Image (cartoon, rainbow, N blue to C red):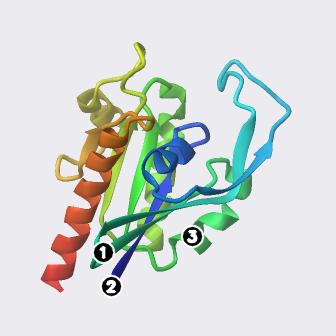
Amino acid sequence: MQTVKMVVTGPFNAGKTEFIRSISEIDVVTTDEGISETSAEFGTKETTTVAMDFGRITVDDDLVLYLFGTPGQRRFDFMWEILAEGMLGFVVMVDSSKPETFREAKSILETFRAYAPTPYVVAANKQDHPEAWAADDLRIALRIDDDIKLLPCVATDKESVKNVLLELLYSILEEMEET
């Protein structure tokens, strides 16, 4: 049996936990803690991931995906490198309805690229929101090369999540064949 470790990362409130919850075949292991503040920027989010989220997907008899979600707040970024260890690929979640988070998303992307030269995709989450930027506009705003997969996503929609993960899996398998 082959196992593939994938990391789901991105800024606070980008949808990482929901992304993993939507597709995991097990109850997601979370380390969410309550937060006492609400802000105009993030609305009324009541919890935040402080260490990680963990989910699993059995693709077939030979392949299992392990999904590790990172905390989105910088004060917990010491967990990022730990979670990145052994990853074969990663997803950067971007809340495409909150342009004020784009710079942070780009910074997280660069941080994870520095941890390991593995395949990655960018998920333009919250495409169901009326304020969401189109994936092509997001690509320009984030200065993401055309050869990087930037995929529209709705983290609460299992099919949408599946499409993002399949694109990453194809990239990982392609890279494995080349080595």
Residue 150: where, in percent of width, then height? 27, 43
- Whether the residues at callouts 3 and 2 have beta carbons within 8 Å, the answer is no
Q: Is mark 2 on a helix, strand or loop?
A: loop
The amino acid on which the numbered mark 1 sits, given as a three-letter code, is Leu
Could you say which disc has been placed on residue 1 in the image? 2
Query: At x 65% / y 23%, what residue is drawn?
Result: 41
Task: Look at label 3 and name its amino acid.
Answer: Leu
Element carrying mark 1? strand
> What amino acid is at disc 2?
Met
Q: Could you say which disc has been placed on residue 171 in the image?
A: none
Could you tell me how far apart the alpha carbons at marks 1 and 2 are, in whole angstroms?
6 Å
* Picture coordinates of residue 162, whole percent (x, y): 31, 49
Mark toward the start of the polypeptide (3 vs 2): 2
Residue 60, given in percent of the width and then of the height, sits at 27, 70
Q: Which one is nearer the viewer's eye here, 173 or 58?
A: 58
Q: Which image quarter is the C terminus in?
A: bottom left
Give the side of residue 159 with respect to residue 76, left or right. Answer: left
- Give the residue number, with chain letter if any, for mark 3: 83
